[in-house]
Amino acid sequence: MTAAASNGAPPPAIELVGINKRFGSVQANRDVSLRVEKGTIHGIIGENGAGKSTLMSIVYGFYEADSGEIRIDGQKVNIRSSAAAIAAGIGMVHQHFMLVESFTVLENVMLGAEGGAMLKEGASKARTELLRLGTEFGLTVDPDARVGDLPVGDQQRVEILKALFRHCSILILDEPTGVLTPQETDQLFRILAALKARGVTVLLITHKLKEVLAITDHVTVMRGGEVVADRRTADTNANELAELMVGRKVRLELEKTPAAIRAVELAVDALSLVDERGVTRLHDISFNLHAGEIVGIAGVSGNGQSELLETLAGIRTPSRGSIRLRDTVISADSPSDPAAMRALGLAHVPEDRHRLGIVTGFPAWESAVLGYQRDPKLGGRFLLNRNAMTGRCEELMQGFDVRPLQPQLGSSKFSGGNQQKLILAREMACQPRVLLVGQPTRGVDIGAIEFIHREIVALRDRGVAILLVSVELDEILALADRVLVMNQGRIVGEIAGKDADERQLGLMMTGSAEQQRAAS
Amino acid sequence: MSARPSQLPRWIEIGLLPIINVLMALVVAGLILWTIGANPFEAIAILVEGAFGSGYGWGYTLYYATSFIFTGLAVSVAFHAGLFNIGGEGQAYIGGLGAGVVALAFDNLLPAPVLVPLAILAAAAFGAAWAIVPAYLQAYRGSHIVITTIMFNFLAAALMVYLLVDVFRDPGQMSTQSRTFTENATLPEMATAFGWVGIKISSTPLNLSLVWALICCVLVEIFIWRSRLGYEIRATGLAPRAAIYAGIKPARVVIIAMAISGALAGSVGVNEILGVQHRLLLEFVAGAGFTGIAVALMGRNHPFGIVLASLLFGALYQGGAELAFEIPTITREMIITIQGLIILFSGALAYMNRPWVERLYLRLVAAKAQGASSHG
């Protein structure tokens, strides 16, 4: 007998009571209680490390709570594994998809629910069920398409279908829009609305306030492992939520004066790149980057932006065309390398922070000199001076407010935002003339985003030429003085930053602007 | 979802866990001994007594450990660059050849203070050269270093048989070995060295190579953890893409790390050829190259850990020999089984005991915290 069941009203779809979870000395969840009403969309927001993911991992059976209760429809349940979670009607769509890329949609959906030793019977049942779900929720995907060939938005639908196929009545989505275009995001929200209309309860974990406000009914804010607020979405606003998440006032708007554009620092001319597998990643790219401006590269992830950054940074060698940095021309015949590019005054904040930007196995003071390990100021001819390195690291950390201020701490122990601040500090410290920045705020907390954006603009005002690649259109719109849109390795459009809007960029990113132009 | 961070303090990670692993290996070994009718406790006592019970035992234990320090360091340096060098055996063999060739060529011309360092350098250089070939193939041709270094062990063995049968064999001798070097090309025994300062210790194969091995430990420590190149090697091993981003050339790192690894493995030749045998012969490496892999694993690729692990394996070799001698039912093969068990538990199954130790530790910490809070 539970409290909810005794008073007539239907019990909540899922209720967490006093959940505690500790990892070593870190209290990841402290006395977390949460009620999610049936058939609603409930947002859980919080910064990285606020305990959202741990909480959902407990609900989905990856971790066991140290104490506390999970109640589904008013009944206490024990969820010790993902299988138990699925049996309890919980489905989860992870931030990084759990799909077998070489399998078809149908095979992926059936995986783990094949229904017998032979596939045939199960497959035909699954096919019928897929069609039914497709029409009921507007979740249409070709069941025979190979998952690896599908766009990200469709892959996400497969994940949702997988959950529905297992009869889930509670669907958890972890940062579902991180990889989607604005159009795909809209489609996802329509699907979520359809799910809600048919009584499915949706838990949406995100750090994007706009989305929470757009689609949820209720929102729970977490900070430091605890629930700090529960609000009806209708009764709150972005500023209040941001303040609750960060624990202090946050300025969401970025103030920025018009760019004072100076000479060309980096000239890219007809640049093409064919990768090891013979796929052409960059087609004939040309643009100039001037001192004192921020050029934003918008595009759906995987349309050549990463390759462009890597080629400009000297990690890849262009196949055709050239890059001119100051007086040096880089081309297939006169290739460069990252060390040489750095020497020419080019700094690079890489997109893939964990694999490129830092060495996760190094302490912070070693990651703080990555790329500058040959700097004469850091030691003698052969040996590095540890005091000089820790000193440099401390300076960088102080300058960019990296927390905790502990150079000895492992690089991987810092939050995403603090890792990013350390990388930015490192790359800005060498007084570059050109700065390449990839996804500067991916997985970074709101408070840190504010700081990082201000620093990038400050650097621009000091006359640095900045190339910004981001899949977050908000970020491009907030920072860029000029926006280039990439699609399938080409630059398909250019708009002045002040004239750009999200819808127009979104259309260009998916290539539909061009198609429309071609059709008319 | 990010991987779960290790929740264990360092003393458990590098101290307690290896000890638990070794103890478990000994328990299993004890069970096996018991089934063949030997008394496990007596066997362990003989083993420990044989390895550490006398100056003679210590001498042999340390002599074996010397070679393991070299090969263990060799594996660890390659490992820091993300390379698995299984070719220590062959590199040690060729390193011995280098020392031997220099000794044979100059032992009637140069005095010991000149010739010995020259021969030590030759051992390192030959070992390095033997490792650079697979390194080059990996760096520029994409051949996998594990495969090529294994194959190079066989090539080394074949080459040595050819050289000792057809080139270096003392004319008129039936056995496949060179003539004995003169005094000029020998590294003094430790007993002799101690004799210079008036201390008397048992005469064993232990020689001054041990000092060189310990110096190498210090040099490797400085190189890997404090030098610019060491930084680049570790960056490449831990995060290859980050290393490229940082302007480090992976091919260069592969070649340098393997050259150093080969030079260290080749130094086994200093211990065996210059220190003990004083002539070139076949199969003097006797598995030290492979033992080095287990030593590096157990020593967590850190020089200090490698010294401790080498000592353990040296003790197993020496104590094991005593054991086989004292208890006839325990054959040489049984000793190899015990060594194998230790390698299995501390190498292949190194992380087997970690989950429960971690659970236990966390429970104890939680209990302590609760106790403290209820009292406070």
Image (spheres, helix red, strand yellow):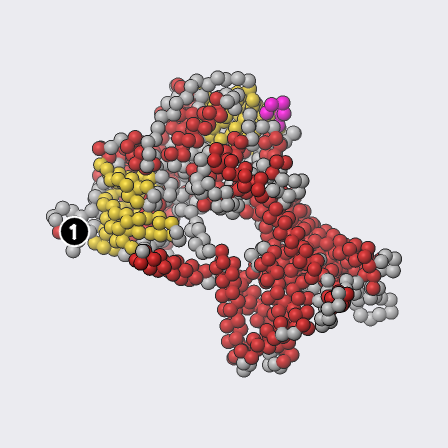
- In depth, the one of B227 and A216 nearer the eye is B227
Magenta segment, prevailing SS (helix, strand or loop): strand
In the rendered image, residue B37, in percent from the top left (x then y), is placed at 54, 82
In the rendered image, residue B53, in percent from the top left (x then y), is placed at 63, 74
Residue drawn where x is 57% and y is 35% of the image: A315
Residue A326 lies in the magenta-colored region: yes
In the rendered image, residue A333, in percent from the top left (x then y), is placed at 65, 29
Mark 1: give few (<14), some (14-19) or many (20+) Cα within 10 Å.
Answer: few
Task: State left or right for residue A431 relative to residue A200.
Answer: right
Is label 1 in a helix, a strand or a loop? helix
Residue drawn where x is 54% and y is 26% of the image: A434
Residue drawn where x is 55% and y is 28% of the image: A431
The magenta span reads A325-330
| Residue A507: quarter of image | top left
Q: Can residue B280 be seen at all in this image of the molecule?
A: no
In the rendered image, residue B143, in percent from the top left (x then y), is placed at 63, 49
The amino acid at mark 1 is Ala
- In depth, the one of B144 and A217 nearer the eye is A217
- In depth, the one of A292 and A287 nearer the eye is A292
Chain designation of label 1: A
Residue A464 lies in the magenta-colored region: no
Task: State left or right for residue A77 relative to residue B34.
Answer: left
Q: Can residue A401 be seen at all in this image of the molecule?
A: yes
Q: Quadrant of the C terminus of chain B?
A: bottom left
Residue drawn where x is 32% and y is 54% of the image: A65
| Residue A119: quarter of image | bottom left
The residue that label 1 is drawn on is A3
